[in-house]
Amino acid sequence: MIQLFHISKNFEGGVSALSDVTVNIEKGEFLFITGPSGAGKSTLLNIMFGAQSPTDGHILIEGRNYQKIPPGEIPLLRRRTGFIFQDFKLINNKTVFENVALSLKIMGVAPAEIKKRVLKALSYVKLEHRANFKPRALSGGEQQRVAIARALVKEPALLLADEPTGNLDPEMSMEIMELFKEANSSGTTVVVATHDKAMISRFNKRVVTLSAGRLLTDGV
């Protein structure tokens, strides 16, 4: 599904976010990426999503080299990927329903199907009663759950989550992780970046550990 070969990423000022990282993620796999703040977790997810390009190395998604894909085709590939951002990236002048529905509208899904899938996604994260609220009226935890519903509503082949439970209490965090497990059991490849060791230990999944941008460990 995802093949990362000797990935390095340098930013302006000589800051190295990743250095020579090689990881292979199989289709249908559930993988945690962990490590302390600044380890390179978010950068690695952004490279998988195609939002950033590596300074060195190659990335293949479903056998296609991301660096050689025409820019016009990248949005089509992203339609198969759900991304849960650490800072939510909700549109403040749209309702919760509209935020979750946006990607389906762009994909040309019929209005009746959009309504069905959005309400289903909101019920998953226990926010159907907030469908007509704007993001600013929600708590941080509720905004995080909207971001999760927005990612899941596309029924993606690949789900990338950057600290998806960072603003949630332990009970809701586990409920969200169960949703990810359910998506994974239906065939979705799931990659979760988190520093929550308790969560990782509860789920017996493969763990990739980064430290200062380098691959430290890779295994269950």
Image (cartoon, rainbow, N blue to C red):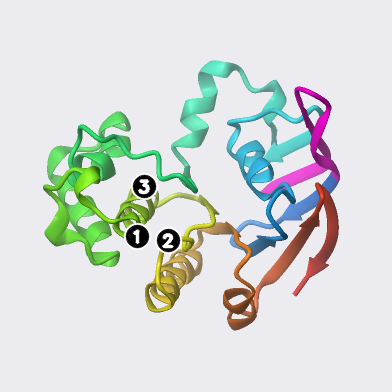
**1 and 2 marks in contact (CB < 8 Å):** yes
* Residue type indicated by callout 1: Gly
**Front position in the image: 167 or 106:** 167
For numbered disc 3, what is the local secondary structure?
Answer: loop
The secondary structure that most of the magenta stretch takes on is strand
Picture coordinates of residue 169, whole percent (x, y)? 40, 72
45 displayed left or right of 23: left
9 displayed left or right of 133: right
Which labelled disc corresponds to residue 141?
1
109 displayed left or right of 60: left
* Label whose residue precedes the other's in the sequence (3 or 1): 1
Picture coordinates of residue 198, whole percent (x, y)? 60, 79
* Residue type indicated by callout 3: Lys
For numbered disc 1, what is the local secondary structure?
Answer: helix
Picture coordinates of residue 168, whole percent (x, y)? 40, 66
Quadrant holding the C terminus: bottom right
Q: Residues within 10 Å of mark 2 (few under 14, many from 20)?
A: some
Question: Where 65 sits versus 194, above or below?
Answer: above
Q: Marks 3 and 2, how far apart in space? A: 23 Å
Residue 204 visible in the current orientation: yes
- Residue at mark 2: 167
For numbered disc 2, what is the local secondary structure?
Answer: loop
Question: In the image, what residue occupies the spot 58% across and 38% down?
Answer: 49
Residue 62 visible in the current orientation: no
- Residue at mark 3: 154
Q: Marks 3 and 1, how far apart in space? A: 21 Å
2 displayed left or right of 155: right
Assess whether residue 174 is covered by the magenta stretch. Answer: no
Magenta segment boundaries in residue numbering? 1-20
